[in-house]
Image (cartoon, rainbow, N blue to C red):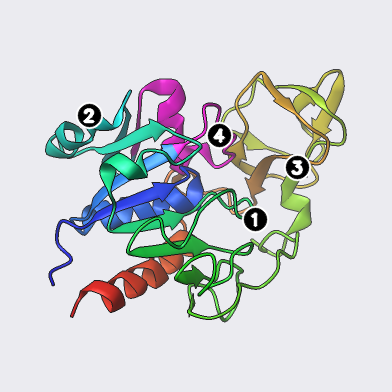
């Protein structure tokens, strides 16, 4: 069976989901994304879910477009564009009938994906058991096993520790110390120094610990709970990295592609 033209439905539109969607689209799979009504992506420069707010989002020359209903999927594919639906309950799968369903929500738990949702069901990261919830789990934890396909069991538990860049890990990521309205006048791609104020939650300032370029940042005027990730800094200061697919996403895509080819390329 040829994999050309297989339908892949991806739950999620954040950084990792978008990296996988981009490369599948470039490999001539028919890709459709589903998202929540108000996505909270931080790496918005490389997140197709931004189309929920802006109508379209372009990443490395590939466009995702918000559509109102599944009956617009085929014409969107004909335009060479990835369709994106607001469908948190995953109802569109009954109409689209995907060959492959990928849970790329990265919620660290299963929000309703079932092994019966498609002939091949893949999940990214922890919260799923391969052979039970899904057919395949892809390891998302940085390190030796990143991108490995798991056919039995689960991915490594969430460490809660960001990947190190330029020798910094926790210092480069901001989390909310309180709940409230997140406001900022900064933008992705802005350069900042250590101890700069980059945002507020209510009247509480959010300050940097290190200098670099803002690579991820929540949208202005977002309500946030305590402990939520708000943004991150790349100490390398290279603007291109804010808007191009990461090495992590590309490696995870390799695991996804291996799982698909193993199932269908017979």
Q: CA distance from mark 3 to mark 4?
A: 14 Å
Left-right relation of 51 to 233: left
101 above or below 131? above
Q: Residue at x 72, y 47 (%)?
A: 173
103 above or below 146? above
Q: Which mark is residue 171?
A: none
Q: CA distance from mark 2 to mark 4?
A: 32 Å
Q: Say few, some or many: other residues with alpha carbon within 10 Å of mark 4 (under 14 / 14 to 19 / 20 or more).
A: many
Report the mark closest to the observer, 2 or 4: 2
Looking at the rendering, in which quadrant would you find the C terminus?
A: bottom left
* Residue 61 seen in render: no
| Residue occupied by mark 4 | 188
Considering depth in this image, is 205 or 87 the residue closer to the camera? 87
Q: CA distance from mark 1 to mark 4?
A: 28 Å
Point out the stretch of residues depicted in magenta: 35-58
Quadrant of the image occupied by residue 199: top right
Task: Decide which of tag 2 and tag 3 comes sooner along the chain.
Answer: 2
The image shows residue 117 at horizontal and vertical percentages of 40, 55
| Residue occupied by mark 1 | 109
CB within 8 Å, label 3 to label 4: no
Secondary structure under badge 2?
A: helix
CB within 8 Å, label 2 to label 3: no
Secondary structure under badge 3?
A: strand
Q: Say few, some or many: other residues with alpha carbon within 10 Å of mark 2 (under 14 / 14 to 19 / 20 or more).
A: some
Q: Which mark is residue 72?
A: 2
Report the mark closest to the observer, 3 or 1: 1
Left-right relation of 168 to 48: right
Q: CA distance from mark 3 to mark 1?
A: 22 Å
| Residue occupied by mark 3 | 174
Task: Decide which of tag 1 and tag 4 comes sooner along the chain.
Answer: 1
Looking at the rendering, in which quadrant would you find the N terminus?
A: bottom left
């Amino acid at each position: 069976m040829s994999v050309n033209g297989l339908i892949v439905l991806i739950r999620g539109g954040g950084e990792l989901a978008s990296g996988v969607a981009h490369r599948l689209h470039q490999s001539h799979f028919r890709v459709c994304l589903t998202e929540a009504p108000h996505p909270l992506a931080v790496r918005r420069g490389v997140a197709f879910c931004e189309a929920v707010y802006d109508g379209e989002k372009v990443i490395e020359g590939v466009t995702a477009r918000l559509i109102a209903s599944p009956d617009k999927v085929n014409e969107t594919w004909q335009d060479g564009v990835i369709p994106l639906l607001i469908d948190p309950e995953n109802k569109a799968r009954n109409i689209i009938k995907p060959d492959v369903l990928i849970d790329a929500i990265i919620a660290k738990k299963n929000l309703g994906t079932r092994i019966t949702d498609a002939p091949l069901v893949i999940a990214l990261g922890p919260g799923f058991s391969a052979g039970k919830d899904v057919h395949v789990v892809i390891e998302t934890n940085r390190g030796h096993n990143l991108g490995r396909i798991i056919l039995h069991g689960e991915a490594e538990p969430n460490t809660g520790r960001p990947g190190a860049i330029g020798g910094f890990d926790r210092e480069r990521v901001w989390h909310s110390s309180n709940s409230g309205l997140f406001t900022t006048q900064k933008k992705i791609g802005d350069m900042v120094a250590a101890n700069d104020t980059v945002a507020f939650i209510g009247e509480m300032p959010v300050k940097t610990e290190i200098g670099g370029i803002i690579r991820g940042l929540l949208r202005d005027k977002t309500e946030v709970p305590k402990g939520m990730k708000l943004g991150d800094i790349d100490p390398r200061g290279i603007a291109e990295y804010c808007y191009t697919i990461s090495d992590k996403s590309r490696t995870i895509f390799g695991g996804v592609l291996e799982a698909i080819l193993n199932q269908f390329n017979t």
